[in-house]
Each structure stands twice: as structure tokens, then as C-alpha cells.
Image (cartoon, rainbow, N blue to C red):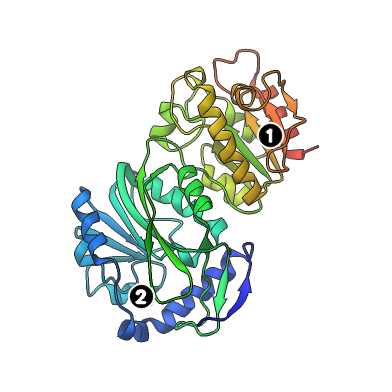
Amino acid sequence: MCCRVADSDTMSLGKHWERTRAAHDAGAAAWKAHANPRQLGLAKKLRAEVEGTVIDLGCGQGWHLPLLEPAVGVDASMEMAQLATEHGTVTQADLRQLPFARESIGGVWASRSLVYLPRTEVPMVLAELHRVMRAGATGYLWVFEDDEGARQWRDDSLPGRTFSFWPRELLRQTLVGAGFDVGEFITWQSDIEFGQIVAPITKRWTLPDYVGADMKLLICGLNPSPSSADSGVGFHKAGNRFWPAAIQSGLVTKDRDPAHALLAHGMGMTDMAKRPTRRADELDKAEYQAGFERLVQLAEWLQPETICMVGLAGWRAAVNRKAQRGWQPETVGDRQVYLMPSTSGLNAHDTVDTLAQHLRTAAVGL
């Protein structure tokens, strides 16, 4: 029986990550002697389902690599990665910055690697997975089931590690926000006191969320355009004024770089609906309403300082059909909401200057 000694969903990534990585480096050889691979049949099933390379995310000693060939193992621990070379091709890398080209990967196997990250850091790892996976690529992600953001155990076999635990609905909504279709969860029974979930995922042609803890401003667009879904960057089309306005407003310093916007400036990005269309009026009210429910859950979980809705149509369809630009009387997850006009080139009434002013107002807050 384990004994809990810490519980937090906001402990810094550095504190979590460095301690956990150090524990794996120090205990790699001993871990090899007593740990055993799990879900071998599921790994074989994944190999049969996909074409091209599979990445084993957090591969540990690489036990699954022979079953996943052609495959590449990725592990943040140098010692673990070196041991895994006995079983296949391995690279040591940060899971948030994968060394693979966009849409180069056919499938992903992540056997309990995400459990070492605080829950609030997982969306960025999922955004990286979305970037490197081809549309339609599949995978299996293995997590611990409970509702704690971070926990350590006194009798852990590799002391110093921190684990995260997920309730099912939060896990499902996070995966949907990351741009994946999610299959029926597989429950894995073991002799430890908490449950384990295997989540089957398929990459959608859409945008992933770029979200995390301590967001100063969460930008919510209506839905991706086809060019944005192709590029992986919201408001990507040359005629869209969002990024020029965001740079002019001082919110960001790099053009069309949502990861940098979040990590360097605290500006997160999501969409009201995930289905790409050429025009926002191709979406129906039900899609906006379903997206609004997900936005509420996202805001309640990550608690950005404020939310800025870009484009009036989604808010009018889901919340208030008479809403006008500016601060809204309604909140989302107790967060204040600013409604600004569309940044599309089809909106001839606004300029980069006026759009930048809207973004400044939203960032300052009420």
C-alpha cells in the first residue's frame, strides 16, 4: 500500500520534471531487473493498425519497441534511453519538443509516460503529438485514474517521482481539445490501489489547443479554417489580421507561433468548435453549444485570467444572440469574457489597429 505525501495541480513543471527524470536516471539499471512490460497484445494491435513509424513516447527500457517496429523510442531520461537501445532506435528528448517533422508519424504508444507530468502540462505534450502525427494516425495513451494533479509516494520503487491522476471526463475533454477523436476507454486492472486507463486516440484534421496553467489570456476562435488545420496554426491565412494585431498589441512577439505565445507570454489558444470550415456560417448552433460546454470545463480547470472570444457568431449562437462586442455580462467558468470582432479579411469594418486595441482591452481585463 502506498502512502501519499504530496498533492498539487500547480507545482512547477521544473520541480516535477527534474526530480522525476533524476529518479529514472538513478534507478534505470535496478528498474530493468524487476519491471515487466504490459499490454503486449495492445502494442501488437497498434502495429497492425497503422502504416509508417510508431513513436514509443516515454519508452523506458524499450520493451515495446520490437513489437512496434518500425518504431522510434523517445525518453527524457538519458539512462533509460541508453538502455532502450538494446531493443531498437531511441532518442533522448523532451516530450514537449519532439524531434520529428510535422505529420511524419503513423502512430503513438505512450505507456504511462504522461503520468509523470502535471496535468496542466499534458495539453502541450498532446499538441506536439498532434503536430507530428498524420491525420488519421492512431495511438494508445495510458494514464492513472483518480482526481489529483500531482502525487508522490513514500514507497515508490524509484523515489522522487511525481504522478498525475485523471478523472475520465477531464481526460476525454483534454484529448478532444488536443484535436483527437477518442475511443472507448480501456480499463487496466492491477494490484495497485488506483485504476489505470488506456485511451485510444485518432488524430483529427483540426487544431490542437495550446493551453496550460497561469494563462493571462485565453483566445477562443470560432473554428479552424482549412488552411489553419493544414498548418497547425490558428488564424494562419495571410489575409487574417489576428497575428499582426496580436504583435501590434504587445501580446506576442513571434508571428504564427502559438506554443511560444503560451510559454513566453501566457496567451493560450482554443476554438469554439473543432470542425474546419471555409466560413464560420457553415457551423450549426449545436456545434457551437457543444464547444461552449467544453470551453466552460477548460476555463474551470485552467482558470485563465480572462477569455477573449474572436468573432461574434459563436457566442451569439451558444450564449446570447443579441451580444455586442465588448465585455459580456455572462462569464465562462467564473472568468470574464471579452467579445471582439472577427479578424478575418472578410470583416472590412475593422483594421489591424482597431483589432489590436480590442486585444489590449481584453488582456488588461475589467
In the displayed structure, 247 sits above or below 178; it is above
Question: Mark 1 — residue?
Answer: 249
Residue 80 drawn at (x, y percent): 35, 75
Residue positioned 70% across, 22% down in the render = 354
In the displayed structure, 112 sits above or below 353; it is below
Residue 34 drawn at (x, y percent): 33, 84
Q: Nearer the viewer, mark 2 or mark 1?
A: 2
Nearer to the camera, 105 or 205: 205
Residues at circles 2 and 1 in contact by the CB criterion of under 8 Å:
no
| Mark nearer the N terminus (2 vs 1) | 2
Residue 122 drawn at (x, y percent): 50, 56
In the displayed structure, 10 sits above or below 27; it is above
Please indicate whether residue 262 sits to the left or right of residue 158 in the image: right
Q: Which element type, helix, strand or loop, lies under badge 2?
A: helix
- Would you say residue 217 is visible in this rendering? yes
| Label disc, if present, on residue 80 of the rendered structure | 2
Estimate the spatial distance between the alpha carbons at disc 2 and disc 1, rounded to whole Å: 45 Å
